[in-house]
Each structure stands twice: as C-alpha cells, then as structure tokens.
Amino acid sequence: MAKAKLRPKKSSVSASKVAEVAGVSRSAVSRTFTDGASVSPETRAKVLAAAEKLGYHVNHLARGLIHHRSGIVCLIVAEMQTPFQASFVEAATRSLQDKGKVVMVLNTAGKPANVEAALRQTLNYRAEATVVVSGAPPRSLVETCIENGQRVILINRNDAIEGPQFVMIENEAAATEACFILRRAGCTRLAVVSSTAGTPSIVARETAFVDAAQAAGIEALVNRAGPTGYASGAESARQLLAGANRPDGVFCVTDLLALGFLDAARIEFRLRIPEDLCVMGFDDIAAAGWLGYDLTTFRQPIAEIADHIAGMLEDEDGGPAQMHFPARVVWRRTVRP
Amino acid sequence: MAKAKLRPKKSSVSASKVAEVAGVSRSAVSRTFTDGASVSPETRAKVLAAAEKLGYHVNHLARGLIHHRSGIVCLIVAEMQTPFQASFVEAATRSLQDKGKVVMVLNTAGKPANVEAALRQTLNYRAEATVVVSGAPPRSLVETCIENGQRVILINRNDAIEGPQFVMIENEAAATEACFILRRAGCTRLAVVSSTAGTPSIVARETAFVDAAQAAGIEALVNRAGPTGYASGAESARQLLAGANRPDGVFCVTDLLALGFLDAARIEFRLRIPEDLCVMGFDDIAAAGWLGYDLTTFRQPIAEIADHIAGMLEDEDGGPAQMHFPARVVWRRTVRP
DNA sequence: TTGTAGGCGTTATCAT
DNA sequence: ATGATAACGCCTACAA
C-alpha cells in the first residue's frame, strides 16, 4: 500500500447501540425506521428518543445490501460546467431526489476512456440506474450493467444496442425547421456552424440541416472550427464571413456556438442582426435570452426529460425503450419573422 | 407501504458465485481484488477469468460496511445551473475522483429546509465528507455529522461553529481592491450592485466595498433588485442609471449581475463602457471573457480550491480549520486602466 | 498460499 | 408487538 494505513474512521452509531440505550431489541429499532412495520407507540418513542440522543441514522449501505436496491442513480457526464449540461444535471438531481433517489455524478472530464471507468463505478456501487449524458459507453459494459439488473439510459445517442433505454431530442425535425425558418426569412445563402466534437446530436443537426437545404436546392456551407463552444462559434464567423459570398442565414448547432458567432459577426464584421444576417441556435441556454443577444433558438425540454427519466425508474416494467422529445422554437430577434 | 411491492432487482453476481465458477474459495476471490493481498498467479488468473465471464464487480457498499469508509463524498449545492456553481461542481467532482472518491450531489433546489434533509442523506450513506457549497446547515446536524466521524467542509460561510473546516474566498480584500481600482480610474460616484440573497459572500463583498468607499470619503450607493442573477443586474441598472446623479463606477458582487447591468447600461441607456461608466464583476465566469462583454472581474481559483478540498480528505489529521484563497483581478475592458 | 469462521449494520422471517 | 436468528456481500484474522 502506498499510503500509510488509513485508520478506520470513528465509527458511527449503529442500531444495536440505539437498542441498548433504549432497552429494546435491534429489531425494534429497525421496525421503528421501516415504513409500515408494527411497533407500539411506546417502544417507538423510546427508540426515537435514544436515536435522537445518539445521533443515529439508518445505514443505507447496509440496508441496500439486503434490499438489493441502493437508491443510487449514476449520472455520467462531461463538460458539466457548460450551460446545457449544467442545467440538465440540475434538473435530473432534482427530479430523482423527488422520487427518493440519490444521485452520484461521474465526471468523465472529457476523456473517452473514463466513460468505461465510470460505468464500472456504477457497477461497484450497485446503482439502480445509470444515465449516460455524455460519452460513448462501451457496448459490452452496458450489457454487463443490464445483466446485473441495472437500468441504463442513454441520452441523445443512436447506438444500436439492445437493452438500454433511449431518450432523444428530435434533432432532425428541429434542424429541418431551422432551414425552413431561415428560408422564409429570405435567406438564400445558408450555412451551418457545427463543431469537431462529432457527438450524435451535433451530427444529426448538421446533417439534417444540410439535407433540408439540399432539398430546397441550396448548397449549405458547413463549418467546424473546433470543439463545441463560444470560441469556435466566433472563429467560424471569421471563416465564413470573411469571404465574398458570405452566408446570410446561419444555423448554429448549439447556442454557445451561436453566441460566439453573433459577437464576432457584430463586433468584428459590423454586421446587423437580423438585417444583414439571420442566426439560429439550439438549446435555449439562459444567455440566449439576454438583452444583448435575444437569440432565436430551439428549447430542449430539460425539466420534462428529467421528470420522464425519474418516472421511468419508478415503474418496474421499464417503460418504452425509446422516448422522443420535441425541441420547440423560441422566437426572439436574430431571425426576421 | 404506499407503493405495490417493488420486487428485488435481478441480483447481481457476488464473490461466492465467482469462487464457485473458478473452483476456489470466497477468500481467494476477495484477495484477488484487494490491493496487497497474497494470491498465487494461478488462482488469480482463474478468478479473473471467472469474474470477467460473469461480469463480477466488487460491491463497494458491502466493502464500505467493513472498512467504515464508503468512498462517498457529498456535495450540497443549490442553483447548480449557474455558471459559478456549475464550474465548482465540475472541478470538485474531477479532483475528488482523482483521489479515488465518488461524489454524491445533493441539490437543495434553493429551499433552506432541504439543506437539513441533504445533511441527513449524507449521514445515511455514511459519506466520508460533506461539502456544503450553498445553504446554511443547521448547527446541530453539522455536529452530529462530525460526531459520526464525517468530515464537514463549509464553503464561503462564516458561521461560528466548532468542528467543520472552512474554505473561504478573500471577499473583503477583493471588494476593497475593487473600490481602489474604480477610484483610480477616476470614478467619483460609486455604487455596488448586490442581491437580496444575503449569502455570506454577497454580504461580505457588499459591506467591504461600502466600507472602503466610506474610508475614501465616498458614500457608495447600494442596490439590490432581486436574486443573484442577470435579470437583477439589469434591473439595478435601470434603477441606478435613471436618476440624475448616476454612478460612474459600479462594483457588481457577481459576474451575472455585472453582465445584466452592462447590457442594460449599453442598450437601454446608450452608455459607453468604460468611458461613461466603469463596471467590475466577481467570479470570472466564462461569459465575462466573451467579446461583447470583456468584463474586468475577480477570478475565484476554483480548480485550486477543489484540489485543496480533495487533498484535505487524504490526510487523516484534517489539515487547517480554515483556508483562505485570494480572488485575483482579471483585467479586461470595462474599467479604464 | 489457501480455506474457514466471524463480523460489519440491516432487515425479513419466524416464533413467542 | 416483540425478540432471536439468518442472510445480504464482503473482508480479515486465524489456522492449515
């Protein structure tokens, strides 16, 4: 062992100590803290008093050992400081807690290899369910999870795996609508600002937009300046707007990209939005609604998704294998009506 | 029981099953997965093979039962979709995972009553430590946690409690410096934009700024339009800038407030920043660095704080009862140099 | 090196 | 209603 011996922590108070102090049996203590068990008001009071005095709290780890349900739900996520991911984690923790679950957050720190490690932790802690918000989980491990009775929920992924449940946003429909909206605003030179991340959502939005444009007889430009974020959006603006034949309608596959694009377009190219250029985003993060941006975008129904996930875990039969949520347009001022 | 009986989940594979398949004893399996235990390469191989085949993973819940250390660290947090909180959670999960801990996030959803419930969960899951990022934990419960051998770390709180460890930002020094910087920029009518949240950090920054101004012979205006956020900042701008004797140097106790203030000042009052008005923020969230804002602010060393916390949990003796971190100025363009 | 036995804190079962 | 007992999955002496 590398480290000097870690002495066991000051042990916390157990049910038998409470029983001893209260002058009853362990079972009486257990029953006092078990819903629907039968204890006389008398002993119950004695136990409660002793418990309060000693600072006793039921050990959920031991309880889980017997019940085969830990109450733990794992969230595997990366880049959780970004607005959308952060909002999702917030909503998920809230919904899951409401259902009596407790959330363990596994941060993959963007390293694909860590997804596997995270999934293993999930198994180690006997999580009841694992929600993969970001990253590509190795198929075999997902299967192991499911074989071990764990629920696996994949968000916005299109892997062809049997077993996990999928929750997806209707990216294609939204991207197609974006194309329609921009064309209706009179835009004739379309572009899509994407990223090099290559996640299923990003790719789906990008592809669907290009296809929709194609169907309308327009060859949409695609620009990917880097990872999905503000800086890449700004850089894409520099690349797309410098040329002679610059686009007049841009769909950014993420709000963060859109905000970077907007800022660069306005500040560095002195373009007026939406007169010279229409811009749409995706996600409806808080900043999209700020006075300086007023970005027209698509809202992902985060709270509804979180509630749906929490609900899935309640009914034993699992619910649908796939659930789709629409992304609805939020009209603001970066697109001519 | 309210709910119909929840059948126990398909039980996952245990060490004894692995032992059975591998043709060895339970202990051999245990030893294979215990650092520094002695197993012959032969049996080890047999065990590993069986484990792989069955998809066995050590049950950390059971292991924690014996070791009196669950490996779990709880994070009690509210408003975790806001940039600063989100970044903190991201950094903390990362640092703690690096130390082999696993993070449980308890979202209080802004309700003070939930802080107590969260602290109870902390006890229930035998967390090794609890980090209170937001909210005011009831003193008695904190003491219970500590009596049960749990580490309690309070972030940016000034409660006078014996037992927990405190990690604080030097809010006063920063606010005092903000006052100095604004005065040096030639500002003579100072104001501080704060919020009605009344958290220790907010109050400390607000008070220290007012005091520093006072010491310089200036009566700083204080404005609190609502909760700590973009909208309140914008509203404060409307209230402060509408009057005749409007301030020309403003310290916003949070970047989000500052961004709202900036937008309203520029868009609704057509003020030029920093010519007409200097603005400073606090936190250095990502948006502060965006092209459209370029906000001069104070950076909280989030990564360092997270590393420090993770480090504290490693050495058994606990480390210092208080640790202070400086907030350093990040010079951008909303204050004249 | 290996196996056996006991115990960690709970709860379910079975008598009482 | 109450108490004794077994079991959950694991680890750690202890003995072989």
Image: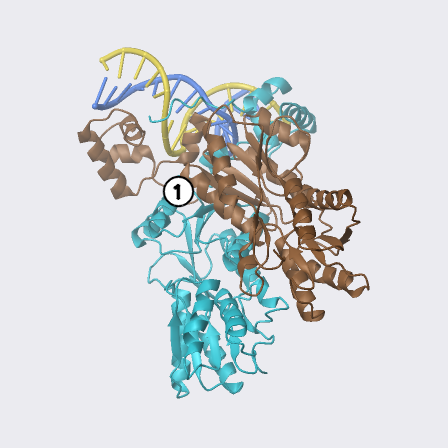
Chain colours: A brown, B cyan, C yellow, D blue
Looking at the rendered structure, the secondary structure element under dot 1 is helix
Is the residue marked by circle 1 packed among few (<14), some (14-19), or many (20+) residues within 10 Å? many
- State whether residue B215 is above or below residue A10: below
Q: Can residue B205 be seen in this view?
A: no
| Image position of B202 (left or right of A321) | left
Residue ranking furthest to the right: A244
- Name the image quarter holding residue A141: top right
Quadrant of the rendering where the C terminus of chain B is positioned: bottom right
Instruction: Indicate the amino acid at tag 1.
Output: Gln
Give how far across and how far down residue B46 sits, in percent.
67, 23
Relative to A92, is C7 above or below?
above
Q: In which quarter of the image is residue D7?
A: top left
Does B265 sit left or right of A169 as displayed? left
Residue A334 in view in this figure = yes
| Rendered residue at 62%/46% (across/down) | A108
Instruction: Residue under label 1, please give it.
Output: B121
Q: Is residue A247 above or below residue A169?
A: below
Q: In which quarter of the image is the N terminus of chain B?
A: top left
Camera-nearest residue between D6 and A310: A310
Locate residue A73, reporting x and y percent: 50, 37
Q: Which residue lies furthest to the left in this view?
A: A42
Report the label total: 1
* Residue B38, position as x, y percentages in the image: 62, 32
Tell which of A230 and A26 is nearer to you.
A230
- The location of residue B39, given as percent across then percent down, is 63, 30
Q: Is residue B219 left or right of residue B285?
A: left
